[in-house]
Image (tube, rainbow, N blue to C red):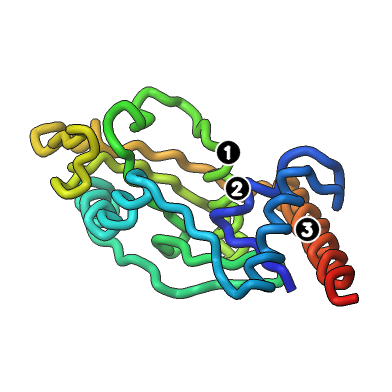
Amino acid sequence: MLKIRCSQIGKIIANGKGNNISSGAKTYVEEKIKERLYGTIKNFNSKYTEKGNLLEDDAIQFYAENSEFGLLFKNDEFFENEYFTGTPDIITKDEVIDIKTSWDYFTFPLLDDNLKNKDYYAQLHGYMELTGKRKARLVYVLMDTPDHLDYDNDHISYENVSPKLRIKEFKFEYNDEFMNDIKNKVKGCQEYYNKLLKELEK
């Protein structure tokens, strides 16, 4: 059965009512079909994702030391249900927390009052659904770019910048209506996935 990675939920929820899915969702499903048939996974990488992956542990520690938590541990447990799969960055008693490492201060949402990236909002809802938590927190952290990731002299040090200018939090709670819509879209994707498989197996 097709299950949607929480980080990919944003690709399937646009447009359509109920189980009806968008052209973008169909494209996503078709990619999953090809990955299954050809036994390979399409990987995407960029300087932004490379920095985020490389500095994830450091960013978690920096955030913990400069927040009310003091100490946090990265979660390694993989979760799945009939709709989603995912591994949240951090799970506390009351909430799930996802850490995003900004490339530089231009991409760091210091002055944003609301979370503009709705894909991340959807991703955190997936994590809440998987873990049973009903509160989530998306945290952007501004970390130094390692020298070997210096693209076009983009390396900037934030060592002397106040932590309050290097951490930006967005907090929200579980939205039942939003989650029901997501689940309907997943069901639509699963139906399309199964339909394509049957046609290819004829």
Q: Position of residue 80 (x, y in %)?
A: 60, 72
Residue type, numbered disc 2: Ala
Picture disc at residue 122: 2
Q: Position of residue 184 (x, y in %)?
A: 80, 54
Which residue is the extreme one toward the left? 160
Whichever of labels 1 and 3 marks the residue nearer the N terminus, that label is 1
Residue name at image x 50 percent, y 29 percent? 114
Q: Secondary structure at mark 3?
A: helix
In space, the residues marked 1 and 2 are separated at their CA atoms by 6 Å
Q: Position of residue 120 (x, y in %)?
A: 53, 45
The residue that label 1 is drawn on is 118
Image quarter in which the N terminus is found = bottom right
Residue type, numbered disc 1: Lys
Q: Nearer the viewer, residue 123 or 163?
A: 123
Residue type, numbered disc 3: Cys
Q: Secondary structure at mark 1?
A: helix
Q: Is residue 155 above or below residue 87?
A: above
